Amino acid sequence: MLWELFVIFFRVGCLAFGGGYAVMSLIQRETAGTGRIGIERFQEIGALSGMAPGSIATNSATLIGYEQAGLAGAVAATTGMILPSLILVVLLAAFFIRLHDRLSVRSAFYGLRPIITALIVYAAISFGFGAQTESGQLFGWETLGMLLICGGCLLAIVKYKLHPFGVLLLSAVAGIVIF
């Protein structure tokens, strides 16, 4: 069980480009999609992981590992999740010091931006509407509530320049009231 958790999250960690939110759909496929945990429980884990300090992907790995095999499972899943990034950062840092002035290197990083943006949008859609699509009802009152909260958060941050932490708290209160 521990080795399996390590391998699952090592594989996810190898493909983790774009930050934690971009990887959530892959974690969902590897865990909830295989029947290890339910889709609703995965959404709860994602919400808890997003509120905790640190990467949502690493926090999700830790919580899933803990639920599957206790403290040892949390350590195995977290190690599997962060080890590929650690190895890659160490290797790239050694070469990037010599190559950072080249136009091709800068261009490659600019080319990754649209892909990462698409991964984040896909993760938001699949995470936000995952339970609704399973039940066959995509546009219900829950969807309307989520869209209203999302629009209100966007308005609060962009127009009124509220601090994101305050917006997070207000959206949590709105979620409690609506749902």
Image: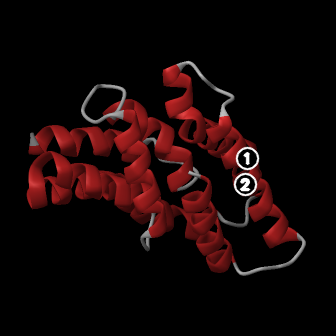
Q: How far, Cα to Cα, is label 1 from label 2?
A: 5 Å
- Which amino acid type is marked by label 1? Leu
Viewer-side residue, 123 vs 155? 155
Residue 178 percent location from the top left of the image:
62, 54
With 37 as the anchor, is 141 left or right in this view?
right
The part of the image, by quadrant, that contains residue 39 is: top left
Residue found 34% across the figure and 58% down from its top: 82
The part of the image, by quadrant, that contains residue 173 is: bottom right
- Circles 1 and 2 in contact, beta carbons < 8 Å: yes
Q: Is residue 101 above or below residue 76?
A: below
How is the structure coloured here? Answer: secondary structure
Q: Is residue 160 above or below residue 35?
A: below
Residue found 84% across the figure and 65% down from its top: 155
Task: Mark 1: give few (<14), some (14-19) or many (20+) Cα within 10 Å.
Answer: few
Residue 100 percent location from the top left of the image:
66, 65
The part of the image, by quadrant, that contains residue 12 is: top left
With 115 as the anchor, is 62 left or right in this view?
left
Residue found 32% across the figure and 34% down from its top: 38
Give the residue number, with chain letter if any, for mark 1: 147
With 117 as the anchor, is 176 left or right in this view?
left
- Which amino acid type is marked by label 2? Cys
Give the residue number, with chain letter if any, for mark 2: 150
Farthest right residue? 159
With 169 as the anchor, is 51 left or right in this view?
left
Farthest top residue? 136
* Quarter of the figure with the N terminus: top left
Q: Is residue 148 above or below residue 170?
A: above
Residue 40 percent location from the top left of the image:
40, 39
Residue found 36% across the figure and 54% down from its top: 60
Viewer-side residue, 133 vs 123? 133
